[in-house]
Image (cartoon, rainbow, N blue to C red):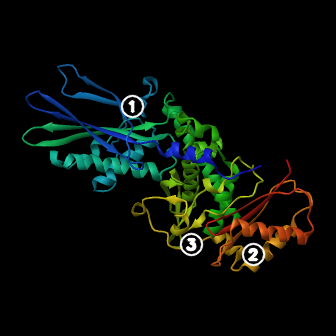
Amino acid sequence: MRKRAGPERRKGAAAVRRMAVLLVAALIMLATSGCDMVRFLLEPLPPPPTLPSIETLTTTTAPPSATTTRTSLTSAATSSPASSATSPAMTTTATLPGDDFASRVTYLIVKGLDAASREIVLDEALAGLRIEEEDVDETIEQVFDLFQEIYYNRPEYYFLSGQANAGYVLLRGTTTTLQSVTLKPGFIDSVQNLDAGLILDRKAKLEKAAGELADRAREAGDSTLSQLQHVHDTLIRMISYDLEAAEVSTMNRERSNAASAVLDRLALCQGYAAAFQLVAQQLGTETLLVTGMAEEVNHAWNLVKLDDSYYHIDLTYDDPTPDGGPDAPVDHVHFLRSDRQMQSTHAWKQTDFPAAPEDGAFYYREGDLVSSTRKELQNRINTFVASLPRTIDKPQQMEVLYTGKDMPTIANLEDMLADALQQAGRTGQILYTRRVDKSIVILEFLPPG
């Protein structure tokens, strides 16, 4: 029997979102006297706000003839790339777009990630700027913020772990100024031993598959609403929630990206959200990845902008477990919903995301699946039960948005269903599920066995 997301899913979502992001900036001050000083700045990339424990700290000093000191920091959640797979530092000689520091840094990071570089030199972003010592910490924080924006808004970079290490150099002279910045983005374990070509081959396959999904959505309907619904339903039918990965911490990141969802068809919550974000972006729809809590564990889902308003979409919570396969009914409880409706199970830092004050629930409103009174709801249940085949060989589902003030309870639904079964003359053993979630009434009849 298919069931709703239970403790396995919630535990998996928690494991995914508990992955703290450790961003380390090593500040190297070069004094004219030859005396070096090293200090470390720890910058968490929220969410979540907690940092993993630091296990080892290693400092390696360059030969006496050199002018710099190298430092490295290893944490429980950070893996160093294998030497055989290390890409050269990414630099560029092209003219950088934009006159501001943020635009230059973003351009250089994106250019580096497009080459799957494990070291991205940002020195060109400093050209023409004089950043003195008291402004360095703020500047590095800005670099981390820009990396965070890319990580959460560019799901095609499936290989990112969400961690990064930034090294920067201060030169002490008459005044102390920032001389160099290098960003080292962390990669997921499965690509640590791969060269850039293989990583980018999978990226190309992901983008091609996402483009094909977007094309199919355009064929399914002209409106943005119909296209987003097509993507929602298609991805849910394609992807299976990976219960095994939810139980194994080392697999969490591997199932929390768009490539795992679209190409491998296995994902945890962030993988679902990243896949939807990627395809929706190809349709030209502004789509955000939201991180927060659901039923008191860490979770990820989406916000989309539709006709100047934002709405929540949560594919993970609309996909039952165990997986029902490509022909199973798809829930739409979490498709284009408001902040108020989502708050019954989800929590997030609302100041970090656009508000979604209006409840869309357009699947129900556009599909004439709305009841405002108990009598209307009873009639819909009667009609649904009467339409069921005598032998149920695949799941049959009814979804209705109830807009009345007297929201039915589970006991009410049991009584309504008993009346409908009696009226339809159905006897014998019948397997079904029933629930009320965010003003949506759902009845599902299941095959025997």
Q: Where is residue 174 in the image (x, y as percent from the top left)?
A: 6, 41
* Relative side of 28 to 196, left or right: left
Disc 2 to disc 3, C-alpha distance? 20 Å
Image position of 282 (left or right of 403): left
Question: Where is residue 32 shown, x and y percent of the image?
Answer: 9, 31
Q: Report the amino acid beneath label 2.
A: Leu
Element under disc 1: loop
Mark 1 vs 2, N-terminal side: 1
Disc 3, SS: loop
Residue type, numbered disc 3: Asp
Q: In this view, does 97 lie above or below 284?
A: above
Sequence order check, earlier mark of 1 and 3: 1
Given residues 154 and 294, the one toward you in this image is: 294
Q: Name the residue under label 2.
A: 377
Q: Which callout, 1 or 3, points to the residue nearer the camera? A: 3
Task: State the image quarter where residue 329 is shown.
Answer: bottom right
Give percent across and percent down for residue 182. 31, 38
* Label whose residue precedes the other's in the sequence (2 or 3): 3
Q: Would you say 293 lies left or right of 261 here?
A: left
Q: Mark 3 points at which residue?
A: 359
Above or below: residue 91 compared with residue 313: above
Q: Mark 2 touching mark 3, by CB under 8 A?
A: no
Between the residue at mark 1 and the residue at mark 2, the CA separation in whole angstroms equals: 64 Å
Kind of element beneath mark 2: helix
Q: Distance between the residues labelled 1 and 3?
A: 49 Å
Dot 1, how many residues are within 10 Å of its Cα: few (below 14), some (14-19), or many (20+)?
few
Foreground mark, 1 or 2, reads 2
Looking at the rendered structure, the kind of residue marked 1 is Pro
The quadrant holding residue 359 is bottom right
Q: Mark 1 points at which residue?
A: 88
| x and y percentages locating residue 236 in the rendered image | 67, 53
